[in-house]
Image: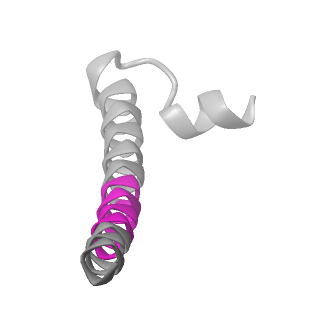
C-alpha cells in the first residue's frame, strides 16, 4: 500500500513540474510572437518604402 502511495506522490510531483514547464513555454511563445510582430512591422516600414506600418494599423 505504501508503494502505491509513494508512486502516486511521484506522479503528482511530475505532473506539477510538467504544468510549470508548459506555463514557461507558453510565456516564451508569447514573447516570441510579440518579437515577430515587431519585426514584421519594422520590415513593412523599411522594406516596402510605402506607408509606415503604424499608418496601416490605424487606417
Which residue occupies the extreme right position in the image?
59
Q: 53 left or right of 38?
A: right
Start and end of the magenta stretch?
13-27
Q: Percent position (x, y) of residue 12? A: 38, 72
Instruction: Locate residue 56: give its quadrant.
Output: top right
Does 21 lie within the magenta span? yes
Q: Residue at 29% of width from left, 84% of height from top?
A: 2
Q: Percent position (x, y) of residue 15? A: 36, 64
Q: Along the line of sight, which residue is nearer the eye, 25 or 36?
A: 25
Q: Quadrant of the C terminus?
A: top right
Q: Percent position (x, y) of residue 42? A: 33, 38
Q: Residue at 31% of width from left, 76% of height from top?
A: 13
* Magenta segment main secondary structure: helix
Instruction: Locate residue 41: give its quadrant.
Output: top left
Looking at the picture, the colour scheme in use is one colour
Q: Along the line of sight, which residue is nearer the eye, 30 or 10?
A: 10
Q: Percent position (x, y) of residue 58? A: 72, 37
9 vs 29: above or below: below
20 vs 41: above or below: below
Which residue occupies the extreme front position in the image?
1
Amino acid at each position: 500500500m505504501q508503494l502505491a502511495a509513494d508512486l502516486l506522490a511521484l506522479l503528482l510531483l511530475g505532473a506539477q513540474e510538467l504544468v510549470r514547464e508548459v506555463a514557461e513555454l507558453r510565456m516564451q511563445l508569447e514573447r516570441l510572437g510579440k518579437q515577430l510582430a515587431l519585426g514584421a512591422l519594422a520590415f513593412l516600414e523599411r522594406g516596402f518604402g510605402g506607408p509606415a506600418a503604424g499608418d496601416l494599423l490605424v487606417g
